[in-house]
Amino acid sequence: MNDRPPVGRLARVLGSMLLASLYAASLSVGARAQDSSQPPSAQPADAAKPADAAKKPATDSKRVADSKKTADGAKPDAASPAADQSGEFVETPVGPAAAAAPAAAPSAGNSAATAAQPADATAPTGSGPFGFLNNLGHSANLFGDMWGLRTALAKYGMTLSVVENSEEFGNVTGGYQRGFAYEGLTTGTLQMDTQRAFGLPGGTFNVSALQIHGGNLSASNLGTLQTASGIEADRATRLWELWYQQKFGDSFDVKVGQQSIDQEFMVSQNSGYFINTMAGWPMLPSADMPGGGPAYPLSALGVRGRAHITDNLTLLAGVYNGSPAPNNNGDPQKLDPYGVSFPLNGGVLAIAELQFVYPGPGTLVQAGESDPLARTYKLGMWWDSEDFADLRYNTLGQPLGNPANDQTPANHRGDFAVYAVADQMIWRSEDPDRNISIFARPMFTPLQDRNLVAFSVNAGLTMHEPIFGRDDDTAGIGVNFAQVSSGATGLDQDTAFYSPGVYSPVRRNETVIEATYQYEVTPWWQVQPDIQYVFNPGGGIVNIYDQTEKVKNEAVFGVRTNITF
């Protein structure tokens, strides 16, 4: 890469933004033209209703929890990154940061269509191969009924989602080098409701695949711990998830099969709006779990149970293969390039999470009182039984930073960490779609001899409808922080001591600040400009192209577009 952005790719992304603006303007002009063609007496149906019709009935109490609202008060989005806290699974396209917006209570994560399509998702859109153009401004999918395919699948209880995330990002300062890169992800998901398909109540079958294309800015230019985009990965066409979920009544369900746990565990609804990878699958498990953990673009065989203890409390727990890769020697994505190795020869990854959501389905509010501000709090812990190498000392207790010593690291059995997640609405206008929420997600492990990252946290603020009338837009500002463990810092200090003639910086921590704005052009198309600034990239690492200095702070700019087909 060079200092000048690739003109062709950048032009395509900027062109899509211009097209978005032109398309939105054309919808507005069309709507005005339609209104002007009506006789003066013609009014929308709602306008004919008496003024009192919209008022709430005066009752002693009312139920306020709507299962179709998200934990942060936003409406569910067709391209959503999160895991379902309401009890019903919602499939997502990628790790939480790659999608358009968090889903109703799954995140994550992040960066796809819900299992239950919106009412107009499969509605007939007109005859002929271009009939879908008649409903572009209102359909949840670009191709609407997809020439009858969705209607045909619905007869057998199946729903199909195809989502494309495309982006152009680049660093204009710092990094190994400056430049821009195109990155893309296509996610296909097919789900089947077994009751509609063949009469088995409560069952859901899911299969999803990824087609990852383009470059990887963080690997080629940035060298950061907290990578710039949640869709960055090795180029591949691979199976992502393959599982079956069975409900037992309204309070318990079990999922079995190949699962990506970032879709349900450690999910923050509000964090999922951001593009940086750590907004979805956090920094600590990305660095410390074998193979980065069973999270996008990887997954692992396992069993997950979910119990709704009360209207407000849910317990989520799962047991999975200890690593998503067949072994832990090398790039886990290359070790399983198609996602079909299904390893079961590793250790065990066990994870549990207690979730508190308020208001819940049974929450009551007295007449005249406003609805409570939504909140979600989670506490969790994971443990992995795999073997982990010591970062600083060999099997004899000698420093690995001394090149004269044997370089076989000491071995440790097992690893664990604890975490918390908080999403809290702090303000809501008379229009409930317009609100402000904050989030925080700290994680910590005391086992610093075997883990690269000892502590990480991401936190921030999001605002829905930041501009009046743009009720499907979201703006946000967030910060991600990662603390390098004492084991890794000690290794760097030893290396500098035993090799005084070689420039050897000591890694400490890394901080990323991100500002983003998600603009909805149509229900099936979002455009999202994004700015990130990275302090002390990689925690403080040497520049591979100039080994006399550290990688300098990085200003990263880009834009993402999400299209649901």
Image (cartoon, rainbow, N blue to C red):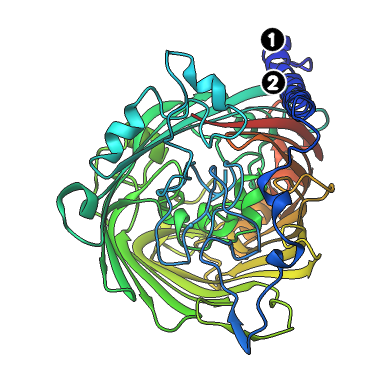
Q: Residue at x 81, y 34 (%)?
A: 40
378 lies above or below 533: below
Give the residue drawn at x 52%, y 70%: 447
Q: How far across and how far down the image is residue 456, in percent?
A: 64, 62
Q: Is residue 410 visible?
A: yes
Q: Are marks 1 and 2 in contact (CB under 8 Å)?
A: no
Q: Position of residue 113 (x, y in %)?
A: 47, 42
Q: Is residue 564 above or below residue 391?
A: above
Query: From this viewpoint, is residue 347 visible?
Result: no
Give the image location of residue 303, x and y in percent: 27, 62
Dot 1 or dot 2: first in sequence order is 1
Looking at the image, is 565 positioned above or below residue 53? above
Residue type at mark 2? Ser
Classify residue 554 as left or right of residue 323: right
Q: Quadrant of residue 149?
A: top left
Q: Foreground: 171 or 54?
A: 54
Q: Residue furthest top?
A: 8
Left or right of 104, for residue 222: right
- Give the crowd class for mark 2: few <14, some 14-19, many >=20 residues within 10 Å: some
Q: How many labels, in total?
A: 2
Q: Circle 2 is placed at which residue position?
A: 16
Judge by depth and name the residue closer to the eye, 130 or 334: 130
Q: Residues within 10 Å of mark 1 (few under 14, many from 20)?
A: few
User: Which corner quadrant of the image does residue 414 belong to?
Assistant: bottom left
Q: Secondary structure at mark 1?
A: helix
What residue does disc 1 label? Answer: 8
Q: Which is more toward the observer, 308 or 274?
A: 308
Three-letter residue code for mark 1: Gly
Image point 25% across, 39% down: which residue? 155
